[in-house]
Image (tube, rainbow, N blue to C red):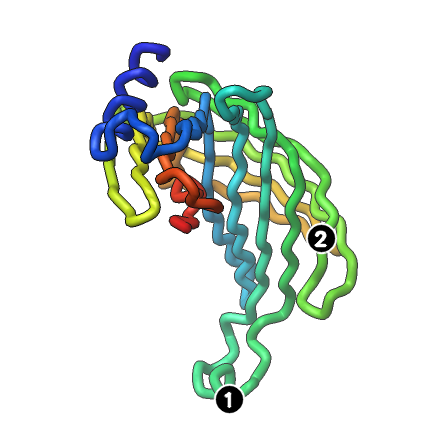
Amino acid sequence: MKRLLAVVAVLALATFGAGPAVAAPNIYHVISSSNGSAYVAVPDGCELTEVFLSSSVAMYAAQPGPVNKQGLTSVFVRVTDTCVPVAAAAGGGGDVLFEAQAMNMAKMVADPRLRKASVSTAMEGTDADGNPVTVELDATWTGTGELEHTTLSDATHFPEGNVVAVDNNLRRAAVAEVSVKVAGRSVSGTDPEATLELVKANCVEVARRGVEEFFPCFGFPG
């Protein structure tokens, strides 16, 4: 990793050289970031309950700087009346019976080779009218496909400076089992086309001397 960072830093400095025209580089690491996503649709008579789920765990660090480990889990639940005629629904017939969304900092637990992952948490959120709700979530992912490996690298020159980014990505197709309870409703279902992903990356910013707020690694070129 140290050797790779040295190469990245040299590439970032290459356009300007190492003279007084440039400031010291900012180096950011995604030490690891694992993410699982799933979509479940469960019909029950005229009602269709959909669950959209994303959960992650990641470690980040600047150089120099401390390591920051955090999780993020979000869920969106929607119940619709599929028996409402399309024309009536389009005219405000009210085919959406219930919606709720919630997010918290729960960490997904993931195998480093993406063979399995899980998350279990109770989340405070709101329904479509802004009323508070509690969403109880249990989800597991089981890897089914081959482990896919890709690498990406990008070097970009801005008038304010240079940025070099390198990504090392793993991905595996998975089957997800999702269970949700919210507002007296409960649903459990399977997503046979879920995914698990793991990203390791770093980004180097080198601003021209005197340039302030040059943060292309975060989408703000200056």
> In this rendering, would 76 be left or right of 215?
right
> In this rendering, would 24 be left or right of 159?
right
In the rendered image, the quadrant that contains the N terminus is top left
Could you say which is closer to the camera, residue 120 or residue 49? 120
Q: Which residue is mark 1?
A: 91
Gap in angstroms between the C-alphas marked 2 and 1: 29 Å
Point 64% across, 65% down: residue: 98
Q: Is residue 86 above or below residue 184?
A: below
Point 52% across, 24% down: residue: 61
Where residue 136 sits: x, y (%)?
Answer: 70, 42
* Amino acid type of the residue tagged 1 in the rendering: Gly
Point 54% across, 37% down: residue: 55
Observer-side mark, 2 or 1, equals 2
Q: Spot the residue most to the left.
A: 15
Q: Spot the residue most to the front.
A: 20
To which quarter of the image does residue 114 belong? top left
Q: Which residue is mark 2?
A: 125
Point out the tag, 2 or 1, that comes first from the N-terminus.
1
> In this rendering, would 126 be left or right of 200?
right
Could you say which is closer to the camera, residue 16 or residue 117? 16
The reply to whether residue 5 is in sight is: yes
